[in-house]
Image (cartoon, rainbow, N blue to C red):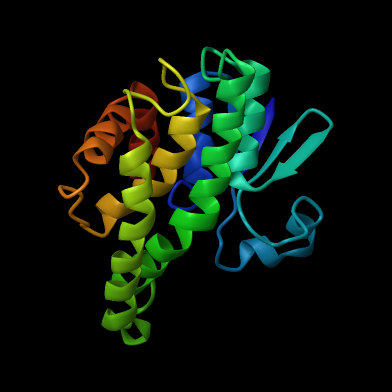
Amino acid sequence: MIKLYGIPRSRAARAIWMLEELQVPYELVPVSFIGDCRKPEYLKINPNGHIPALQDGDLTLFESLAINLYLARKYDKGLWPKTVEGEGKAYQWSIWAMTELEEPLLTALLHRMFLPEDQRDAQKAADGEQRTKTPLAVLEGQLKGDWLAGKEFTVADLNVAAVLSWATLIGMDLSAFPKTQAWLGRCTARPGYARLISKMG
């Protein structure tokens, strides 16, 4: 059985969402980003000391969006693009989500919610939210139809939406990006996302 190491309230949520979309059996092995991921036994699984990590038979993978690309490609269920061009878009948007979108969103999230209150910096939170608007403008301009890599929901949409969903946690107003807001709504209306949310408690 597939083993996913992590906890729902972390980047592991992205892989949980994918596994729930695919409806393949898996075991969620609780590993917290506070302490657990630096233990020697876990560092043998992911030497970077981060979550999530995935074991599928003899294969071990780390990096959340790479895990999702692998799962979508192996188990498909319609989540892997049907064309080479669609695959290119899936890789493009997954890498884009990590290099352009995640850092400013994470900065805002940390300083609004996750850090202890005495370590939060309101200016850093506001700056992170402001910088998020640059990649959002790119996404808004690229959304030509309902989905990012073709006529159906695919791993491209899941990977970007899994990162962008942090915007809702920080209460970011997306109304200036109506196509993006509607697209994110379509993504998070899926039953797989609802099953992820139910695991967050």
Q: Nearer the viewer, residue 172 or 46?
A: 172
Q: Residue at left 60%, top 36%?
A: 91
Q: Residue at left 64%, top 37%?
A: 67
Residue 199 in sight here: yes
Residue 174 appears at what percent x and percent y?
20, 49
Query: Is 199 on the left-hand or right-hand side of 182?
Result: right
Residue 52 vertical placement versus 111 (above, below): above
Residue 51 appears at what percent x and percent y?
61, 53
Residue 14 appears at what percent x and percent y?
49, 41
Considering the image in quadrants, where does the C terminus appear?
A: top left
Query: Is 84 on the left-hand or right-hand side of 158?
Result: right
Q: Residue at left 23%, top 40%?
A: 181
Q: Residue at left 47%, top 43%?
A: 13
Residue 25 vertical placement versus 118 (above, below): above
Residue 26 vertical placement versus 29 (above, below): above
Looking at the rendering, which quadrant does residue 106 occupy? bottom left
Q: Nearer the viewer, residue 42 or 47?
A: 47
Numbered disc total: 0
Residue 10 appears at what percent x and percent y?
48, 53
Residue lying farthest to the bottom in this orientation: 118
Q: Nearer the viewer, residue 120 or 93?
A: 93
Q: Nearer the viewer, residue 189 or 36?
A: 189
Considering the image in quadrants, where does the N terminus appear?
A: top right
Residue 196 vertical placement versus 12 (above, below): above
Residue 25 in sight here: no
